[in-house]
Image: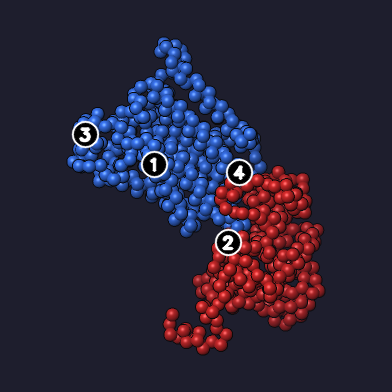
C-alpha cells in the first residue's frame, strides 16, 4: 500500500501520525467533559495546542529545505505571514457590516483611512475558495520568483541566508505602511467568523484544531513522500556535494526551486491556520527574528528527520508559553541557552537521543 | 571590437568567422572518429595564463594519458571540458556537432562526459548503493526522479558494478565510512553507472596500494574501446602500465601541449626530459 511504502522505514513519523490521529479523537471528547472533571481540557488549551501544531507545520517546511537541501532559510516567516494575510483578508471580508463603522463593503481600517472603494487586490477575498488558493499561491509565487533568481545565479550558503532575511525584513517594512492596504501597524483583526461558524464558539475552535492536526499529518506525508523518493536522495546529494551532483547531470537549481516552492506553500498553509486561532495577523509576523526562531526549533528537534522539527517546535513553544507566563525575564536566556546546549551537546537534536547512532 | 582586432581577424588566414562556424546540435556525431576537439583554448586567471593556446584531439574509444608537472593546466583543462570554467578564447567540441562552450555542467554531463575528481567526491551521507543509483544514466528531470523506481535490468547493472568495484559486501554502508581507496573505487563505479562516452579521470590512483593500482589500470584499459578515457596522472609507473607500447601520451607544460606520442618517444623527448622527467 502506498502509505505503508513511504512510511515503513520512518519509526518517528509513524509515532507522530499515530499521536496526531489519537489527538483528533481524544481532544473533542476531553473538551466535552464537564468542566469539574479531572480530565477536562479547556477550549483555551485546545486552541493553544492547535497554534503549536501550525507552528510545527512551519518547522516541517523549514526542515524540508534546510535539513534535506541545505538551504539555511532565515525568511520562511515571510511565507507563513503571507498565508496568514490571505486568510486574514478573507476573515476581514466576512465581518461585513458588523465592524465598528458598519460599512458592508470596506474593512474598518479602510473606512478609517477614508478610502472610498476596495483596492483591486482585495477583490475575490470574500470567497473562501479564492482565499484558500491565494493562501498557497501567494507564498508559492514569491518563493518561485525569489528562488529562480537566487538559485539560477548560484547564490548559496551564508549569502542566501542573508538575502532571505532581507526578503522578510523588506516585506515587514512594506506591510507596516498604511498605503499598502493591509492594515498597517495594526494588521488585520477583530475577526468574527469563518465559513459562517463563529470563531468564538468552542466547536469552531475544536474544528480548527482538527484542521491543524490534519494539515500537519498531510504535509508530513507529502514531505516524507518527496524525501524517500530518488528526488529526496538527490536533495541530500545536493546538500553534501552540490558540484558533484551538477557534474552528474542533475539540474541543481531546478531541484532547489521545486522543493523551496513546495516548502513555501506549506508555510503559507501553516500561517492560514495560525491566524484564525490567534485572532490577529500583523506585520510583526514578518519580523526576521521569527524566522530565525523557526530554525532554532528545527535544530533543537533534530535536522533532516521531519518529525524532529515537530518535536522541536512543540517543545520550544510549550517552554515559551510556560516561561513567558511564569518567569518572563528568563525566557530569552533560556532559549539562547537551549540553542547553545543543543548545538554543543546534541548536534543531532533531541530526537537524536532516540535514534540509533549513524555512521559518518 | 577595435579596428585593430577586426583587421587582425580579416587578415588571419585560418580565421573562421562566427557566421561560418558550425552550429551546435543535439546528437553526438563521431563520423571523423574524433570524440573531443579542443582548439586554441586559452584561459587566464588574474593575468596568469593557466591554459595557453591548447590543442588536443581525443579519438573515439581511445585511452589517453596526460602528464605534466604541477600547474601545467591539467585540472583547468578538465574544468573547461566539463563546463566549470569558461575559456577566454578557443573552441571545444564534443564530436562534430556538440559545442561544449554553449552548455553548462549538467547539460555536458547528460551529453555524455563523466568526470572523476582528484579528491574522491562521493555523497557521504548516502549508502554505496544509493550513490550508484543516483549516478545511473537516465532522465534527470525533477518530476521523473520523483517517481523513479529501479527496474530489474537496472538492478542487475547496479549489482554488476558493485561487484566490479569490490564493494559487494557493503552496498548498505554509508559512503562516508568507506576507506580512501574504497571511495576512489566507488567514484569510478559511479562513472560507470553514468555510462558516459568520454571519461575524464583525474589522478585515479592517489592513495591506492600497488595492488589496487593494478586493478585500476586493468579496469581503465578494459573501458577503452567502448568509451574514450582521458587519464590525468602524476604517477609515472601507473602511466607506463596504462599506456603500454602503442597508446598516445600527451605532455602538458605551462598550459599547452609540449609533446605527444608513444610513451617511449615522449620519454626520450629532450624538452620533456628537461621540464618534467629529468628533474
Instruction: State the residue in front, A158 or A215.
Output: A215
The mark lying in front, picked from 3 and 2, is 3
For the residues beneath circles 1 and 4, the answer to whether they share a chain is yes
Measured Cα–Cα span from mark 1 to mark 3: 25 Å
Q: Name the residue under label 4.
A: A229
Marked residue nearer the N-terminal end (1 or 4): 1
Q: Do the residues labelled 2 and 1 touch (CB within 8 Å)?
A: no
Measured Cα–Cα span from mark 3 to mark 2: 59 Å
**B62 above or below A304?**
below
Q: The red chain is which one?
A: B
Q: Mark 3 points at which residue?
A: A103
Along the horizontal axis of the image, is A36 left or right of B253? left
Chain A's colour is blue
The mark lying in front, picked from 3 and 4, is 3
The mark tally for this picture is: 4
Residue B220 seen from this side? no
Circle 2 packing at 10 Å, graded few (<14), some (14-19), many (20+), is many
For the residues beneath circles 3 and 4, the answer to whether they share a chain is yes
Q: Residue A108: which quarter of the image?
A: top left
Q: Is mark 2 on a helix, strand or loop?
A: helix
Q: From the top left corner, tell me how far across and down residue A251 is, in percent.
A: 55, 55
Q: Which mark is residue A134?
A: 1
Q: Which mark is residue A211?
A: none
Amino acid at each position: 500500500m502506498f502509505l505503508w511504502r513511504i512510511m515503513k522505514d520512518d519509526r518517528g513519523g509513524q509515532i507522530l501520525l499515530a499521536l496526531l490521529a489519537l489527538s483528533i479523537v481524544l481532544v473533542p471528547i476531553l473538551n466535552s467533559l464537564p468542566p469539574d472533571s479531572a480530565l477536562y481540557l479547556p477550549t483555551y488549551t485546545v486552541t493553544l495546542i492547535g497554534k503549536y501544531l501550525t507552528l510545527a507545520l512551519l518547522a516541517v517546511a523549514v526542515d524540508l529545505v534546510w535539513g534535506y537541501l541545505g538551504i539555511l532559510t532565515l525568511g520562511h516567516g515571510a511565507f507563513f505571514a503571507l498565508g496568514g494575510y490571505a486568510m486574514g483578508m478573507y476573515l476581514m471580508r466576512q465581518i461585513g457590516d458588523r465592524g465598528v463603522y458598519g460599512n458592508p463593503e470596506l474593512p474598518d481600517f479602510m473606512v478609517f483611512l477614508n478610502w472610498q472603494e476596495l483596492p483591486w487586490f482585495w477583490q475575490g477575498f470574500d470567497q473562501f475558495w479564492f482565499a484558500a488558493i491565494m493562501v498557497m499561491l501567494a507564498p508559492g509565487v514569491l518563493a518561485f520568483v525569489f528562488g529562480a533568481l537566487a538559485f539560477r545565479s548560484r547564490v548559496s550558503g551564508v549569502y542566501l541566508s542573508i538575502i532571505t532575511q532581507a526578503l522578510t525584513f523588506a516585506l515587514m517594512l512594506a506591510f507596516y505602511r498604511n498605503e499598502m492596504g493591509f492594515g498597517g501597524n495594526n494588521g488585520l483583526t477583530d475577526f468574527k467568523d469563518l465559513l459562517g461558524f463563529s470563531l468564538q464558539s468552542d466547536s469552531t475552535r475544536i474544528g480548527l484544531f482538527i484542521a491543524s492536526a490534519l494539515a500537519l499529518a498531510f504535509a508530513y506525508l507529502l514531505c516524507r513522500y518527496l524525501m524517500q523518493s530518488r528526488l529526496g536522495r538527490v536533495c541530500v546529494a545536493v546538500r553534501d556535494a552540490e558540484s558533484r551532483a551538477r557534474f552528474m547531470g542533475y539540474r541543481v537549481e531546478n531541484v532547489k526551486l521545486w522543493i523551496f516552492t513546495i516548502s513555501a506553500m506549506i508555510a503559507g498553509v501553516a500561517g492560514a491556520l495560525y491566524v484564525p486561532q490567534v485572532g490577529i495577523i500583523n506585520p510583526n509576523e514578518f519580523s526576521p527574528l521569527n524566522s530565525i526562531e523557526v530554525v532554532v526549533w528545527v535544530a533543537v528537534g533534530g535536522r533532516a528527520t521531519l518529525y524532529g522539527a515537530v518535536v522541536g517546535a512543540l517543545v520550544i513553544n510549550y517552554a515559551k508559553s510556560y516561561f513567558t507566563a511564569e518567569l518572563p525575564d528568563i525566557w530569552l536566556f533560556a532559549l539562547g541557552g537551549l540553542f547553545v546546549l543543543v548545538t554543543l551537546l546534541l548536534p543531532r537534536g533531541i530526537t537524536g537521543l532516540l535514534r540509533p547512532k549513524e555512521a559518518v | 571590437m577595435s579596428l585593430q582586432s577586426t583587421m587582425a581577424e580579416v587578415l588571419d588566414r585560418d580565421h573562421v568567422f562566427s557566421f561560418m562556424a558550425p552550429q551546435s546540435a543535439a546528437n553526438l556525431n563521431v563520423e571523423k572518429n574524433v570524440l573531443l576537439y579542443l582548439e586554441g583554448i586559452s584561459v587566464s586567471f588574474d593575468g596568469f595564463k593557466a591554459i595557453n593556446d591548447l590543442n588536443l584531439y581525443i579519438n573515439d574509444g581511445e585511452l589517453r594519458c596526460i602528464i605534466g608537472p604541477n600547474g601545467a593546466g591539467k585540472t583547468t583543462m578538465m574544468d573547461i571540458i566539463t563546463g566549470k570554467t569558461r575559456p577566454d578564447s578557443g573552441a571545444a567540441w564534443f564530436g562534430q556537432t556538440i559545442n561544449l562552450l554553449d552548455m553548462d555542467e549538467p547539460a555536458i554531463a547528460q551529453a555524455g562526459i563523466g568526470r572523476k575528481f582528484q579528491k574522491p567526491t562521493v555523497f557521504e551521507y548516502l549508502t554505496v548503493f544509493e550513490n550508484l543509483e543516483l549516478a545511473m544514466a537516465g532522465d534527470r528531470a525533477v518530476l521523473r526522479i520523483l517517481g523513479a523506481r529501479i527496474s530489474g535490468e537496472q538492478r542487475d547493472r547496479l549489482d554488476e558494478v558493485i561487484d566490479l568495484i569490490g564493494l559487494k559486501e557493503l552496498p548498505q554502508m554509508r559512503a562516508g565510512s568507506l576507506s580512501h581507496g574504497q571511495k576512489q573505487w566507488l567514484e569510478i563505479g559511479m562513472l560507470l553507472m553514468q555510462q558516459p562516452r568520454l571519461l575524464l579521470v583525474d589522478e585515479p590512483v592517489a592513495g591506492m596500494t600497488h595492488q589496487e593500482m593494478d586493478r585500476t589500470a586493468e579496469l581503465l584499459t578494459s573501458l577503452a574501446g567502448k568509451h574514450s578515457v582521458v587519464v590525468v596522472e602524476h604517477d609515472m609507473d601507473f602511466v607506463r602500465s596504462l599506456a603500454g607500447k602503442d597508446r598516445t601520451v600527451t605532455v602538458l607544460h605551462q598550459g599547452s601541449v609540449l609533446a605527444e606520442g608513444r610513451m617511449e618517444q615522449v620519454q626520450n623527448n629532450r624538452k620533456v626530459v628537461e621540464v618534467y622527467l629529468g628533474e
